[in-house]
Amino acid sequence: MQKNQLRPKKGPKPLGPYSTAIEINQMLYISAQLPLNDEGDVVGDDIAAQTRKVIDNIEAILNFRNLELDHVVSTTIYLQDLDDFNKVNQMIAIYFSHPYPVRTCMEVTRLPKNALVQIECVAYTEGDFVYEDDDEECDGCACE
């Protein structure tokens, strides 16, 4: 079993002793991303702008490995204020498509650089993903 570290040349660098992403056994584990630009500064002053930047950063890491957001199977979202939950859902619905990744979302006391949101994710890296479902809807969830 080999653990491969991804180090994209563009995008924010880790703020500490951790990897941006690790690939192992056809899975890519992306560390929680903040809404940072390449210089490490927070981008956006509201939850929508910061969520958009976080997802853009995740997408850049995926693209470095020739993957897309559709390869993401799991996300963990950290919010400084759980009242932003619905706004984040709206952004997720714009960027991700059905079937949506599984997700955990939690409110935390504080995030690095006083960001409003931070998202980590897991993506598969090989093989064909086949979605089979009798119903094209979102199974009763409020994702629309």
Image (tube, rainbow, N blue to C red):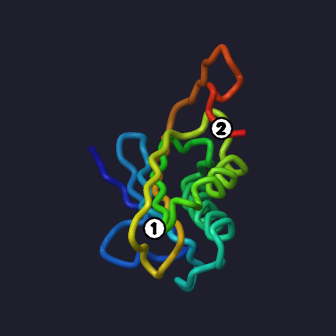
Answer with left or right where residue 96 lies relative to residue 79: right
Question: What residue do we see at 50% from left, 37% from top?
Answer: 126
Do the numbered discs 1 and 2 sit on residues whose CB atoms are within 8 Å? no
Residue at 66% across, 39% down: 143
Q: Is residue 53 left or right of residue 2?
A: right
Q: Is residue 25 above or below residue 134?
A: below
Residue 51, percent from left and from top: 62, 64
Instruction: Decide: is 104 above or below 117.
Output: above
Badge 1 is on which residue? 7
> The N terminus appears in which quarter of the rendering?
top left
Kind of residue sitting beneath label 1? Arg
Residue to which mark 2 is pinned: 142
At numbered mark 2, what does the secondary structure look like: helix, strand or loop?
A: loop
Q: Secondary structure at mark 1?
A: loop
Are there few (<14), some (14-19), or many (20+) residues within 10 Å of tag 2? few
Q: Residue at horizontal 59%, vertical 24%? A: 130
Q: Position of residue 68 (x, y in %)?
A: 62, 48
Q: Which residue is situated farthest in the front direction here?
A: 83
Instruction: Give the image quarter of residue 59.
Output: bottom right
If the image is split into quadrants, where does the C terminus sit? top right
The part of the image, by quadrant, that contains residue 101 is top right
Residue at point 68%, 70% (across, down): 49
Left or right: where does residue 31 sit relative to residue 34? left
- Amino acid type at mark 2: Ala
Task: Say how many tags the image has.
Answer: 2
Q: Position of residue 60 (x, y in %)?
A: 60, 62
- On residue 18, the disc is none
Q: CA distance from mark 1 to mark 2?
A: 36 Å
